[in-house]
Amino acid sequence: MTRYNPAVTILSMDFLAGLNPQQKKAVQSDPGPVLVLAGPGSGKTRVLTHKIAYLIGFAGVKPYHILAVTFTNKAAKEMKNRVELLLGKSSRGLMLGTFHATCAKILRREAEHLPFNANYVIFDADDQRKITKQAILDIGLDIKQYKPGSIHAVISQAKNNLTFPEDFSVNTYRDEVIRRVYVRYQNYLLASNALDFDDLLLWTAFLLEENPAVRDRYARRFEHILVDEFQDTNFAQYTLLTNLSVFHRNIFVVGDADQSIYRWRGADYQNVLRFEEYFSDAQVIMLEQNYRSTQIILDTAMSVIDRNPTRKPKKLFTMRGKGQKVILREMYDDREEAVYVINTIAGMVAQGKAQPGDFAVMYRVNAQSRILEEAFLTAGLPYRLVGAQRFYGRREIKDLIAYLRLIRNPKDDLSLYRVINTPPRGIGTKTLASLKTIALKTNMSMGDLLLALAIGEESPYWNMFSKRAATNLSRFGRMFSLWITHRDELSPLEIMDSVLDDTGYRDYIDDGTDEGKDRWDNIIELRRLAGEYREQGLDAFLETVALVSDQDTIEDDVNAPTLLTLHTAKGLEFSNVFIIGLNDGILPHSRSLEDQEELEEERRLLYVGITRAKNLLVLLYSLNRNVFGYIEPVEPSRFLADIPITLLDEGSPGFVIQQSAFKRREDKWDVKPLSSVGLLEKKYKPGMHVVHAQWGEGVVLNTRIQDEDEIVDIFFESVGLKKVSAAVAKLDIRK
DNA sequence: CCTTAGTCATTTTTT
DNA sequence: ATGACTAAGG
C-alpha cells in the first residue's frame, strides 16, 4: 500500500483550490476505506472529482487503476467532464460509469465464464413485464390474480439480494408460484441470450464471488474505487464493491442516508452502517456545509427530516443567509395548483426576478404531470418534462431498437415478436404460432428458423409450413439474413437505414397525420444518436440505449421550467422549486401509509425535494383531488405539520399548524412507542376552559394519559359530560 | 389478418 | 379520464 509523500503537498494545491477544510480532508484522505457523509448541496460531486484528479495528478495513480461508479449516466458524464477539466487528457483509461454500464462491460468481456454470449441484449422494463406475463401464462395461471408487475417486483428483489431461482425460499403457496415463474423467467432470458437490469448486477456479483481468478484480476486492477450515492446501493452492488476492493481496500464512498429514496428498488441505506462495520478502520468525514440553499430552506428541510427516528443527526449549515420565507398555499384542487404554479412563474419572469429555466415543479407520481402540462399548454408556455413518456418508450423507437437488437442477437425472440409483422407483412398470430411450435420441435430459436427459411423452397423446413406462411416468413427471413450478413461491416446508423429502407418503415409510421410526422421526427432523432456510435459500434449503442435513465434525458440548454418527479430531482438543483400535491395519500403516498419504514422514506423524499431549492420554495396542497375522474376531498400532508410556522410567509394557512399536535403525536406513536410513553405531557388541566368544534364551550374536569393519548373529561354547556380524546378532537384552549 | 367497440384496471417511485 | 387488453366484424 502506498502512502503519499507529504513533502510534495504543494503540488496538490491545484486539486484542493476552492475546497473547504472538510472537503480537503476527504480529497487528501489516506489510502484505505473512506466514508464521506455528505449532506445535500455540500459539494460531494466536487469532492469525488477532485479526489480522482488528486489520485491521478498528485498521487500518481494510473487512470486505468481507478474505478468510479454512479447511478445515472448524467452523474457519470458530469464527473468525467469535471475530471477532464482538472486534468486534461491525462484521465484517459479511467473507468467511470454507472453500476449497470460498468457491469455490462465486465460481463461482455467475461461472458465465456457465464451462461450467455458476449452479444447478449439487455431487456428493458417493458420486456421484463412481458416475459413475466408470458411465464405466468405458460404455467397456466391467471394474470389477474398474479399480476406480472408485482410478481416481477419479487423476482427483482430476489435478484438484488443475489438469490437465484434455485435458492428462492418458499414459505407460502404464493412463493411457490413466484419461484416457478422466476425459473421460467430466467430460462426465457437465457434462451434469448438476454439479461435484465438486475441480471447485470447479479451475474457480475456471481462472477466475482464464484470465480476467484476473475475476481482477483479486477480486484488487483482497481487500486482505487470511488462510489457516488452510496446509500442507494443494494446488496448486489454492495457485494460487488466489497469483492472489487478486496485486494487494495481503497474504497471511497460518498453518501447521505437522508437521501435514500430507492428502498423499493432494493437499495439499503444500512449499507452505510455495514460499510463502517465491515471496514472498521474506515475514516469517516462529514460534509455539513451547504452551498446551495438559504438558511430558511435548510431549516425547513431539517424540520421535516428530523422526525425520522433512526437517522444519525447531521448539522447542516449555510453561509447564504436567511433568505425568503417558504410559501405554503392551500388550493381548491390539483387544477388550481397548476394554475397557481404557472401564474407565479409567469409573474416572477415578467418582473424580471427569474428566468423560466430557474424553476422546477416536483411531484410524487408521474400522473401528476398531466394537469401541469395541460395548464402550460393552455397558457402557451414552454416547459421541459423529465421522464414519464420517455423518448425510448415511444413505439417507433422501440420498434427500431427491436430490429437492431434482433440483428445483433437473433435469439431475441421477444424482439422478433415485436418486429416480425411491423410493418404488417402478412405474418399473423397463426403463422407466428406455427413458427414457434416448429422452432420448439426442431430445437432452434425462432430467429434461427427464420434464417433457415430465407433460402426459400430448398429449405428443409419449408414444407413444415403452409405455402402462404412459408412464403411470408421466407420473405422476411431473406431481409433478416441480409442485415445480419452485413452487420459487422456496417455502422449502427447504416444498419438502421437499411432496416428503414427494406421494411418501408417510413410509409408505415408517417401517415400524413401530425402524429405520424412526430413519430418520424423521433426516428430522425434516433438516427442522429446512432450516428454518434460509428466508432463504438452496435453493442455500445444498444447498451447505452438500454441503460438511459430519466435524468439522462434532461436537456440543459432549454430555458423553460422543469417538470419532474421527486425521485428524478435527486442530485439536481434549481433556484425556485415548487412541490405540488402535498396531501396525505400522495406524499406520503397511500401505498406507504401502513409501513413505518416506507413512511420514513416518503419523508426523505420530501427532504430531497426541499433541498433542491436554492432560493425559493413553494409548497402546495389541495382540498380536493381528481382520482380516476372523480373529485375527492383529501387531507393536507402530515409532513406539513412539522414545518414551524416561523419559516412560512404570512400568506400561509395556519390551520395546518394547529393540527400539528395531533400529527406529531401520531408520528411519535408510530415511531417509538416505548420512549414516547413518558414523554407525552398533559396539555389540559382541570378547570381549563376549552372550545370544541361541535359541542362548543366546556370546562375540563379531569385528564389522564392513556395509550399514547390524552383523555379529557369535559363538561359542555350543550351536551353535558363527555370523554374526549385530545388526539382526535380539535380543542381550543380559552385563556 | 386488421380494425373497432366495449370492458377493465389504473397510480408509486426507475437502473 | 385514459389507456391497455379482449372479443366480435370487415
Image (cartoon, coloured by chain):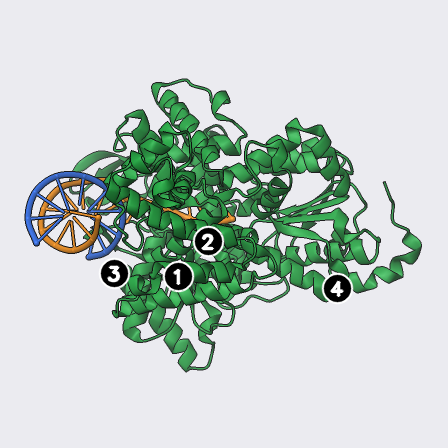
Chain colours: A green, B orange, C blue
- Residue at horizontal 73%, vertical 58%? A92
Q: Alpha carbon of mark 1 to alpha carbon of mark 3: how far?
A: 50 Å
Instruction: In this rendered view, identify the residue nearer to me: B9 or A25.
Output: B9
Kind of residue indicated by mark 2? Trp
Of badges 3 and 4, the one in the foreground is 4
Kind of residue indicated by mark 4? Lys
Disc nearer the start of the sequence (1/4): 4
Q: Residues within 10 Å of mark 2 (few under 14, many from 20)?
A: many
Marks 3/4 same chain: yes
Q: Can you identify the residue that label 1 sits on?
A: A500
Q: Can you identify the residue that label 4 sits on?
A: A89
Marks 1/2 same chain: yes
Residue A483 tag number? 2
Q: Are marks 2 and 4 in contact (CB under 8 Å)?
A: no
Give the total number of marks visible in the rendering.
Answer: 4
**Residue reaching furthest to the bottom:** A351
Marks 2/3 same chain: yes
- Residue at horizontal 15%, vertical 42%? A718
Q: Can you identify the residue that label 3 sits on?
A: A332
